[in-house]
Amino acid sequence: MALQDLCNYHDILVDDATSESAPFGKRIGFKNMSGLTLRNSTSLFKFYIPAPEYLEGSPIQFGQVSTIQSSKDILHPDSILQSLSSLTAPPLASSQSVPLPFPMSHGTTTLAFMFQGGVLAAADTRSSCSGLVACPAAQKILPIHSHLVSTTSGTSADCALWKRILARELRLYQLRHGRRLSTGGAAKLLSHMLHPFKGTKLCVAATLCGWDGGEVEECRDQDFDLKDCREVTKSQVRSLEKSLDASLDKAQRASLEADGQLSLTRKKQSFSGPRLFYVCSDGTRLQGSLFSVGSGSPYAYSILDQGVEWKLTVDEAISIAREAVYRATHRDAYSGNFVDIYHISSKGWTRRSREDLKEEYYREKEKRTKEKRDVAGLDSVCAEK
Amino acid sequence: MEYLIGIQGPDFVLVAADNVAASSIIQMKHDYDKMFKLSEKILLLCVGEAGDTVQFAEYIQKNVQLYKMRNGYELSPAAAANFTRKNLADYLRSRTPYHVNLLLAGYDDTDGPGLFYMDYLSSLAKAPFAAHGYGLNKRFILNLPSFTVRLIDKEGIHDLEKLTHGAK
């Protein structure tokens, strides 16, 4: 196989091909990415973690941006070949297994912030692919369930897939335990599910915006649920983890068991209110009250950092969010077209109809000329006096 | 860019960590706590690669708590440090090494205060003072705005005031 020759990875691929678990073959995200005929999609994954080379690399690798990663929303087969071949002679060996801090170029602008009326999430709708606009009306904010919405950034295919997986897992949790998993729990679940893919080209940077709350509903059958929970963990673990990732196994089981315990004791959830988490495929999981992700995020941050406060009304918050996305799309080439705004409150999420930012531009322009006219008029009035 | 420091005194250990959670050049959070409480008198400070820090530290944290649940008494700081080091070493030559630098600070009722320095190659050293990163304030081009400071003594872990320099 050409891939093996390029990278001298015959031994590793052959040895481990037999021991790989089948479910990985089903990962649609990987298949999309490969474009090459790989016998077993896990071999692509194995390739990205060359353990021997890691030790030869110089000590501190993280913090340095490599030239390999590029700003594409949807990966092109050609670009993959290029990047794969450049990986064979890496100047910094561990840059393959240590994913680099995000080069700020995932063509999008998404933002989310908390305020007294709940959480507001906004995103642009331009989907770019190596410099051309693949879709001017993509949807970057995907609802997960009635009270949880997530903004997506990174590779569109990966985000769509992982959102669906997360939605499925949350629904299963709800059916088993009789209550919705909290936003923090969902974030932890997503982060643990993405952990085995660390170091690969999987790229998902999502902010989960949700409203936690309400009382714990009655559990159907507590013992049965707990057993189910453990079984799910094991199968989940088998299908998700790689052979040596025992830590994920334990941590996931521990966290799910803890949740099971909680449902057994039927505690009333002490916290009720808006929650915002940022989850990234490099493993970051942060709770906060304001996040912006994507290539347009610095521009959005500049508007949000000066405008967002807790006591905003819903309309004010919407206009700040719209303004922030507008400014980002004005300057960032990879963001544009429309803006989607979702508002999550205790009653669930509501979506505003899509707004065209072109109109925002013209409105802004008109306002500007009107102001100029006013100022000019005022000046002339003063001059007369 | 992240900074940890620990100083062992006659009957206490003082530790401080910066508060920045960064994603490339953007500061995503400026009040991020890098200290993980392993038990009433043990703190684990963890810096390094983005996801690895939290994953690894939480793994150690849950295992130390599990030990207490199983056996009825807590691991001593030295035992916890060696356990952590062993885990780092096991993962080092696996497909998924953890790139984290750690300081473990604790107070043992029999041995007194202890500060352990561990790095991503799973070296372990008990030291009277230790640090990770660059802590310079006036000369360094990237300033770390604020630090969380905690003190461990025979009564447990105490939060001291946050240190902030200049504009936050």
Image (spheres, coloured by chain):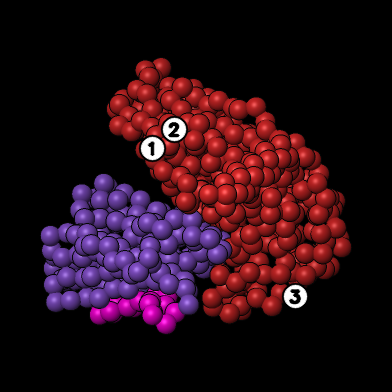
Chain colours: A red, B purple
The residue where tag 3 is placed is A89
Q: Distance between the residues labelled 2 and 1?
A: 6 Å
Residue at 53% across, 26% down: A349
User: Front-most of A306 and A259?
Assistant: A306
The residue mark sitting in front, 3 or 1, is: 1
The residue mark sitting in front, 2 or 3, is: 2
| Residues in magenta, as a range | B124-140
Q: How far apart are marks 2 and 3 (CA)?
A: 55 Å
The residue where tag 1 is placed is A311
Q: What residue type is labelled 3?
A: Ala
Q: Is-magenta flag for residue B134?
A: yes
Q: Is residue B3 above or below residue A287?
A: below
User: Front-most of A59 and B142?
Assistant: B142
The residue where tag 2 is placed is A313
User: Front-most of A250 and B142?
Assistant: B142
Q: Is residue A238 visible?
A: no
A84 lies left or right of A102: right
Residues tagged 3 and 1 counted as in contact (Cβ below 8 A): no
Q: In this view, does B95 lie above or below A248?
A: below
Across and down, in percent, residue A232 comes to: 52, 33
Q: What element carries label 1?
A: loop
Residue at 53% across, 49% down: A385
Q: Is mark 3 on a helix, strand or loop?
A: loop
Q: Which amino acid does label 1 sit on?
A: Lys
Residue at 63% across, 59% down: A104
Across and down, in percent, residue A346 comes to: 43, 25
Name, please, the residue furthest toward the bottom: B139
